[in-house]
Amino acid sequence: MTRKVYAPNVHLFAFHWKNDNQPNQLWDKYSSILSQKFGLTKPLEIEEQIGYRVNLLKHKNVALHFESKVSLDGTQFSITGRVTPVRIHDTYGLAFNARRPELDENGKKTNSLELNFLKLLNPSECLMPKEIGSSLGQTLLLTVWYKEKQGFPRKSLQNRQKLRELADNCLREFIPNEYSYPDFYREGQLFGSSIFEYGVPTQGKDYCHVLVWIFCETGSDRKFTRHY
């Protein structure tokens, strides 16, 4: 099944123990890998704060916002994103988001994209667990809009299976061939849209946790943003 998706996003949620012998692991990975692979020039300025759950960006900013360009088959695309460093008790967290915006600079809707665009949101496999190396693990969340006008009813078992196939294909495009794809684990509904979970928790050291969330219902993304 070859289908296009709209406004694809990737979210990395990585966690690292504050008292580890390399406590700055997440911030170092931003500087040495993420900023380079996504062409970012803004440094991640960390400033420790007092409290149980605190934002760590200097000057009391919550997130570092960025814009960049990626290229696919000779065509350039704008991407945007944000980086949010936090501490929750004795754990550092890094939320990294890169996305194809829903609207262009003129306020018009961007075009739907082939699934191979997803590989541009994971350049040189930089978001994989082996590259980030966080001591307490990570989760990757892919979100894509599957636009209703494409004519894809979701009520029947057959069409739910097609959504699963779409999620599988999104995962294959996002994760490079050098890596083993995490096994399918389970599926469900979140805010009215289908979400698929990959990676079996008992898998051990090669565990890779990925969620693929296919927005089909108007409002799913807004509810997600509200609870982000």
Image (tube, grey):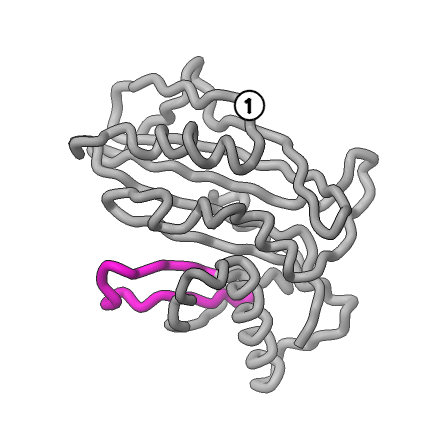
Judging depth in this view, the residue of 6 and 208 nearest the camera is 208
Q: Quadrant of residue 78?
A: top right
Identified at 47% across, 67% down, the residue is 196
Seen in the image, is 195 located left or right of residue 134? right
- Residue of label 1: 41
Task: Please determine whether, in this image, residue 46 is positioned above or below residue 213.
Answer: above
Q: Does residue 207 show up magenta in the picture?
A: yes
The stretch of residues the image draws in magenta is 192-211
Instruction: Locate the N terminus by quadrant.
Output: bottom right
- Residue 170 locus on image (x, y percent): 57, 64
Tell me where residue 138 appears, x and y as whole percent.
Answer: 34, 49
Residue 205 x, y percent position in the rendering: 23, 59
The reply to whether the magenta stretch includes residue 218 is no
Q: Residue at the location (29% across, 61% down)? A: 206
Instruction: Indicate the amino acid at tag 1.
Output: Thr
Q: Nearer the viewer, residue 187 or 39?
A: 39
| Residue at x 66% of width, y 45% of height | 100
Q: Is residue 103 above or below residue 169?
A: above
Q: Is residue 63 left or right of residue 133?
A: right
Answer above or below: position of 32 versus 191: above
Local secondary structure at mark 1:
loop
Q: Is residue 53 visible?
A: yes
Question: Seen in the image, is 41 located left or right of residue 58?
Answer: right
Q: Position of residue 146 (x, y in %)?
A: 67, 63
197 versus 83 height, above or below: below
